[in-house]
Amino acid sequence: MLLQLRGITKRFPGVIALNSVDIDFIRGEIHALVGENGAGKTTLIKVIGGKYQPDSGDILFKGEKVRIPDPHKALQMGISTVYQEYNLLPDLRVIENIMLGCEPLGKFKKIDWRQAAAFCKNLMSRMGVEVDLHQYVSELGAAEAKIVEILKALVTEAEVVIMDEPTAALPEHDVDSLFSLIESLKKNDVTVIYISHRIEEIFSVADRVSVLKDGNMVGTHRVHQISSDHLIKSMVGRELQDIYTIRAREVSPKVVLSVRDLQDGHRLKGVTFDLHEGEILGIGGMTGNGQRELIRTLFGAHRTTHGEISIHGDVVSIDSPQKAMKLGIGFLPDDRRNEGLAVTQPVRRNISLPSLHLRQDAGIIRGREEKKVVEEMVDKLGIKVTSILQKIESLSGGNQQRVVLAKWLPLNPKILLFHEPTLGIDVGAKVEIYRLINGFAESGVSIIMVTSDMMELLHVPDRILVFYNGSVSREFLRKDATEEAVMFAASGNGEAHGG
Amino acid sequence: MRDKDHALKSRGIVVFFLKGYGVFAGLILLLIISAIVSPQSFNATDLLNLGKQAAGLGIVSIGQTIVILTGGIDLSVGSIISFIHVFSVGTILGRAHLVFPVSALCLIMGLAVGCCNGLGVTKARISPFVMTLCMDLILRGLYLIYTKGQPRGIVPDNLRFIGRGRVLSILPVAFIIWLLLSALFIFILRKTTFGARIYAIGANARTAYLSGVKNERIIFTIYALSGFCASIAAIILTGDVGAVSLGLGGDYALDSIAAVVIGGTSFVGGIGGVEGTIAGAFIIKLLTALLQKVNISHSGRLIIQGMLILVIVGVYSRRSRT
Amino acid sequence: MPRAETGRHMEVEKIYRGKLAGFITRIIHPERHSASMIWMVLLFLVIIVVAIVPDFIHPRNISNVLIQMVPLSLVSIGQTFVILAGGIDLSIGPQVSLITVLASNLMQDTLWMICATVLLCLLCGIVFGFVNGILAHYVNIPPLIVTLCTGFIFQGIAFALHKTTGGHIPDVVHEVLTASWWILSVPLLIFIVFIFIGLWVLNRTRYGRYVYALGGNEEVLGNAGVNIGRVKIATYTIAGFLASITGVYLAARLKSGGAHYGTAFTLNSITAVVVGGTTLGGGQGGLSGTIAGGIIVSMLNNVLNNVSFRYGFQSSYYKNILTGIILIIAMLFYRKKR
């Protein structure tokens, strides 16, 4: 028993984030934390990591009652946290990032880089990873960067390493190198606390899993003593099947959008596909194989060097978002807060922005009409707000995504582009979003959704395109797609066995 | 939801006013202090006179408000005023019939300078701070080259009327022009698509772009507008001063930023408006007048203005946290 | 603290190729800051200038040029620290002015008074910088506005204390601080000392690394357990300290103090820093580039003076335009690089 939390309660204005939580962590175990968004997982690890102070309760570390007043103290005690947000300095080298805050000193307070390099090499070999210490972090890929972050957390000889969704931004193949690093930690007797939304991962890597729900500890189980269905049920009170309601739908043969040999000289290396009316087309594959570039190209937010896009048979050139909008295309970006919404502005402004030109006379906005339209959208999409003057930042993830969707509806889009439609949205709200997406498809809107969520990819779209290396590696109808076949295609094996 | 909306709105208006426009409270406070300090000048005539004196600053600050709303800044307005002032006087040379065409030319010049700023910021992607600073420097140089240290010219009476004249022998023409322009821009910012897009760019430029807003075009336009406002102010100030003067634009860049910021418009963009700036300009001029009455020198004014801005902006930024 | 690995023989990675080349590189250029480009430009400019004005090479003139660039360069060192950490200091000019006024008002002819005044001035510089730092960190206002306002305040105080007579600086102080032999001189020596200290601190110490990190991403640095406030406040304090050194020197050289003596330093130091390749957002750039930038700015001003004298026009008219154009060119140039 390395770390124990007894009766930890943490309140924020208006909400009880943690309600008398009891949990313990054994030395050398990999302990997963699961729960919906808002269940309290991040709050819990922030309490352990020193960022938050509990309102009541005790923390016992190695049997002794302790206080963790700040992250610095936590580091000193041997508790390191690797947060979800990017925590590296891109303009500095790997070695400088790893040693940030504890650079070894030589004569006259000069930094001794030789000693630092030696230390890092040692650490890397112990963990079974290798990164070029000399490289600038800005040049690293997502997986390498995550590994550097973990190395950074290990520099202080941590006994507890907390990871908040370490694989959230990683392509699935790179996840393996991360897992082997975690295994190495276990071998070195380091306790790993691991938050993840990816149930499959937890079953492959964790020893025990604890479930949080609405700030309460629901239970802790040994991983092999519980099924994933049961686990999800205890998180939400819902069976797996209910989340993805498979609707049989006839997709019209009419082609709405057609892409031929799209290239951009970098990530896109010849993408070709068709989109039909009323169809939900899913795009999967490992992140970084051109999916992001493709969907942004379709909205005029990415330049291409070659290839053709046609809408209803006419070749078009989508060189700006305005052009895309004129063609009836709407876009929900993956980074909602920074690209889809203006968080300091009220809901009303956000929703009416793209369609302002429809509600004006010589530049003057028809206020009443605009307000009416906004209220209609709020009703139709079920956005939970006390008033349309409310600021975006006070809304939950699911609600925010609905606002982004509401932006486009007044324009009557024919094509909707979703980039990670349910990123950062809890299971309950996900169901609602899928319902909305299905509704649009049924009314004739064509939808493209790029997603890295395997379950979502397999169950929501009518048809699936798997990307590999900048082009379509394989195409599936929903009924033919299996997780294995998709993974295979995503790794570059086009027509594979076991499909 | 309608009721809640209404309730939020009416409570909101009060809060909105206090929060966003606490500046008006500050203005009233300052007026009270001013009345106490020198009761004899606390009458309609003198207050309207204050309006006339603040008009130049007020007009420049309108343009500055719009620029700061998008997250930018315009440091060139002071030297635009100086340059247009000497240029117009030096060209008119006392001939009243030239006032109209030369003024029109000056407005175009102000617009042109603003366009240069706009180009630098949008096409060359130079940060507004640096771009407008450089423009300011270049204009200062041009000013010196043009005047060779000795500005000359006479201001004809019709121009003086704009700057000093009064309608109905009470209302200063300059004040009226200022208020009208303010009303126009308040309307533009609050009620037009252009205005809504300006706020959108200020709040989050990336989101605005991905929502179909033509960022570059709008940003270019607002710098042009700022230059335009500066040239209007230059004409009015020229009329007010009545004679050629060295460095007329002097502190206007910094003063206009002060007026905008005191008026509640935030540097992060997307928050604030011209309404507050009106009060801000008044406050600056009133403060100057007050300090002069209490016999505090120019140096003292600098100190106090500096401290005042710090305090006020500090308070505003704290409020926006809640 | 990481426990050093003993007993394991690891192959040590050679970070710098070649020991001597490495040594020089380490002293002059920090790892990521390739200032070589701007030094090339400087060399190029020097060649052109010498070609046009052969008298330039004369030891007396070189000595003068070197002396003239000292104040700006000193101030620019401080500005570099501040800008690298993601801030900016617009009050540096008024600070210099204020210090010259203080020095010339207080100094008397006795050794005791001289030392006391100098120390007081340095202390003031530290305090001014410290105040800037506190305001910039603890009050939620952009450093641009904070230092703009403190600049107003310092300028106001300088005006208030300014004596029309210009105050008094003892002859001996003037002699000592302006002594020169051949191309060397006391100011140059002061400059070299501070340059080396600056380079050392910025490139070789932990603090220097933190300055870069602060400009790169404050939060990341904070997460690593470093006290951001201290790093930030220290940069402004350094700037203030260097401003006071410059102020004392300037007062000594001009044998007087004036509320307008330092005005040009604000803009010129920022120009020097930008020309030298440091981005205004911080996190990238370095001191060696700033030095080159400062020399370029000083030199171009010097050339402008010479040329205007020769051809009979007023240099002051063109100085502003020159600075403005230099800034724009620098921004365009570095923008392309990124």
Image: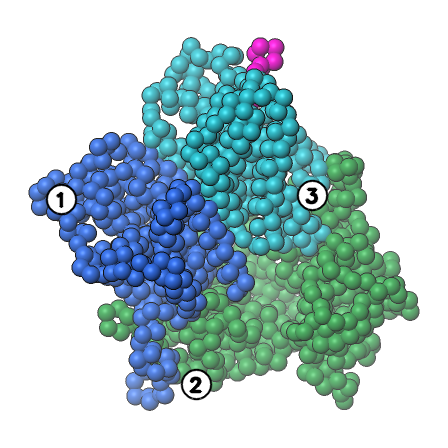
Chain colours: A green, B cyan, C blue
Which image quadrant for residue A363?
top right
Of the pair B307 and B97, the residue shown nearer to us: B97
Residue A483 shows up from this direction: no
Q: Which residues are magenta?
A: B165-175
Residue B167: % across, % down? 61, 13
* Mark 3, other Cα within 10 Å: few <14 / some 14–19 / many ≥20: many
C-alpha span from label 1 to label 3: 71 Å
Residue denoted by label 3: A348
Residue drawn 72% across the image and 86% down it:
A493
Residue denoted by label 2: A125
* Mark 1, other Cα within 10 Å: few <14 / some 14–19 / many ≥20: few
Residue C163 shows up from this direction: yes
Which image quadrant for residue A116?
bottom left
Left or right position of A301 against B281: right
- Which chain does the residue under circle 3 lie in? A
Residue B61: % across, % down? 54, 33
